[in-house]
Amino acid sequence: MADYPVELLSRQPPANLHVPRVAEPTGLVDPTVIAQTHQPPGRIPRSVQRLLGPVLLLALWQLLSSAQVFDARTTPAPYTVISTAYALLASGELQTHLWSSLQRVLAGLGLGLAIGLTGAVISGLSRAGENIVDANMEILRAVPNFALLPVLIAWFGIGEDSKIILISLGVLVAIYINTYSAIRNVDAALIEAATTFGVRRREMITTVILPGALPGFLVGLRIALTSAWLALIFAETINAPLGLGRMMSDAREYFRVDIIFVLLAVYAILGLLSLSLVRYLESRLLQWRRVFDGR
């Protein structure tokens, strides 16, 4: 290598000489950061904003009741319903029936989730599994669950088993249909890309297919929770000593319209809480997915 004079090495470049700057690497963008919506300070939370509709409905209901548009014997005012709810809570009657119903719903939900999710994975991942499982699930979907009530009573009696199975039937159908459809609708380009990189089948299932089907499963879970609360009303007509359905039957028999409205409000609150649970799971499990949020 040639030796350069010291004065050349220590010489500074002219001030007017333009030296292009090399752009610094920007790095990769974290999709979870993009997916998160940062709420401006002072803004009302979305969970509170969603309560605007029910609050306006209650205000309109109270206004019409005060104007005597509604007959108090058939449509009690919100204040009357709240007073009845307070009396039921103070006596502990509402909590006892609610806890009994929650136990049935949780048992039916767990059983339906296990069967529906297992069937969807088996049917969605293999054609042999689809040939065995899918037709049976479609038949079960076509038959109204409540039409099976006499059969369930004949098979399992009037105990808790028939009630839990009736609830699980609606759950497993909703979970199966949505999860199976989501598995089969995973983008084929992702499968081809994973195959090109040499990803094995087991790893492809756990890292590509099942995460891609997760949004469909959560949609099925939302429908399943609604189906569970709907089936609970019919299930608790099978000689249930306790439960919200039993309270509803007794209130209808004695024409306690105020108690009926209290139970309707309880069902509505339980439905909203179930929806909030699914929204929370979506916000945690689907941070990688960027979707339109209705801005």
Image: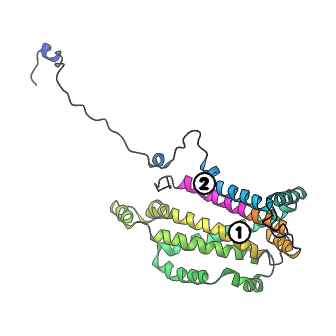
Q: Residue 54 versus residue 285: which sits nearer the camera?
A: 54
Dominant secondary structure (helix, strand or loop) of the stretch shown in magenta: helix
Q: Answer with left or right where residue 284 lies relative to residue 72.
A: left
Residue 184 image point, x, y percent? 46, 71
Give the mark count: 2
* Disc assigned to residue 237: none
**What is the three-letter code of the residue carrying label 2?**
Tyr
Residue at 76% x, 66% y is 264
Residue 191 image point, x, y percent? 38, 65
State which region is magenta: 268-295
Quarter of the view holding residue 248: bottom right
How many C-alpha atoms fall within 10 Å of the one at disc 1: few (<14), some, or many (≥20)?
many
How many C-alpha atoms fall within 10 Å of the one at disc 2: few (<14), some, or many (≥20)?
few
- Which residue occupies the extreme top position in the image? 7
Residue at 46% x, 64% y is 209
Residue at 9% x, 22% y is 2
Name above or below for residue 150 compared with residue 107: below
**What is the three-letter code of the residue carrying label 1?**
Trp
Quarter of the view holding residue 57: bottom right
Q: How far is disc 2 from disc 1 in space, using C-alphas?
A: 19 Å
Q: Answer with left or right where residue 130 lies relative to residue 20.
A: right
* Disc assigned to residue 229: 1
Pointer 2 residue: 280
Quarter of the view holding residue 224: bottom right
Residue at 44% x, 49% y is 31
- Which residue occupies the extreme left position in the image? 2
The numbered mark, 2 or 1, whose residue comes first in the sequence reads 1
Q: Residue 260 versus residue 173: which sits nearer the camera?
A: 260
